[in-house]
Amino acid sequence: MAANPSTIGSGRSRAHGATGRADETHKPRWKRLYDKYGTAAGMSLAALAIVIGYAGRDSRRLFAEHGLGYALGIIGSLLILVLLLYPLRKRYRILKVLGPVKNWFRVHMMLGVVGPIAILYHSNFALGSVNSTAALLSMLLVAGSGLVGRFLYAKVHKGLYGRKTSLKELLAGVKLTTAETGGAARFVPDLLSMVAEYDRQVLKPPVGIVDSILLPMRLEFKTRAGYRSIVARVRQQLDEQAAQSPVVRQHRDRLLELACAFVREHLKRVRRVAAFAAYDRLFALWHKVHLPFFYLLIVTAIVHVIAVHLYAV
């Protein structure tokens, strides 16, 4: 045998992990906490505000026609109008005086939640006339579309505010190398070929919108099944070699652990590459429908304001 099992390991993986941890630790603590929990905390607060608002709709004295309810309608409408600044800032260079696009993206996402909540309180979580109902439903459609877009954006970008990931970068991460197995491939000759066989089955682009939507879910099940199948074959080969070699028998569990870690990590990368094509396609489609939804909201909101102030309906 070419190597002693007791000396194998993945030095490069440890170095890479240490580098990743160093990149994280140089950030201020509040920034690390914000990156990790900020989105979840914000969404939780928004959900809590909606639940409290809906539960107390009958006990509050909020009226859309006057007082605090009327003020919330104005505030919510203005916040939704401010959302337009993000696509305008992104498209027109002359607006760079307004600040970085990244900051406006944060504002866009935050106001996309706060504005609709203000409108929900304005309506007291109830449907009204035809024009107000149309405006409310349009707003909910845009808000729901925005949440879907935020999910898809995170799937095709490096972090929530990062640049778009490229398929070339992802494919580079799934290139099979003996070194990444921690040396286990020397004692499991078919390890790389087994994983490569799985790659050929999975790395197929989705066909159509329905396939793009279902692909991530199918990949989850296929990855689990592929992992179990490959590990079972690895365990069988190690057992065969352990029966012939006392050295392999002594370090059989360590070899199996390294092989399993490699397979688990590689399949995760492959799944991300395969899912990226689906998410990228869905994100492109989302771009085409989100803006018309927003235009519909603007039109129905204008009609609602005119109907309320001129015709009192």
Image: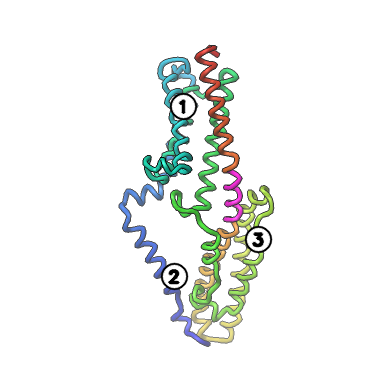
Residue 237 in the image, given as x and y percentages of width and height: 61, 78
Q: Looking at the image, which residue is at 36% across and 60% down?
A: 23
Q: Quick one: SS at disc 3?
A: loop
Identify which amino acid the numbered label 3 is placed on.
Lys
Quadrant in the picture for residue 289: top right
Q: Which residue is mark 3?
A: 204
Q: Quick one: SS at disc 1?
A: helix
Q: Which residue is mark 1?
A: 77
Magenta highlight range: 276-286
Residue 180 in the image, given as x and y percentages of width and height: 50, 73
> Dot 3 surroundings within 10 Å: few (below 14), some, or many (20 or more)?
few
Residue 235 in sight in this render: no
Residue 302 in the image, given as x and y percentages of width and height: 53, 23
Do residues under tags 1 and 2 come within 8 Å of each other at their CB atoms? no
Q: Nearer the viewer, residue 133 or 104?
A: 104
Q: Looking at the image, which residue is at 55% across and 31% down?
A: 140
> Dot 1 surroundings within 10 Å: few (below 14), some, or many (20 or more)?
some
Q: Is residue 279 magenta?
A: yes
Quadrant in the picture for residue 107: top left
Q: Main secondary structure of the magenta part?
A: helix
Identify which amino acid the numbered label 2 is placed on.
Ser
Q: CA distance from mark 3 to mark 2?
A: 28 Å
Residue 229 in the image, given as x and y percentages of width and height: 63, 67
Q: Which residue is mark 2?
A: 13
Q: Earlier in the sequence, mark 3 or mark 2?
A: 2
Left of 238 or right of it: where is 179?
left
Left of 274 or right of it: where is 97?
left
Q: CA distance from mark 1 to mark 2?
A: 51 Å
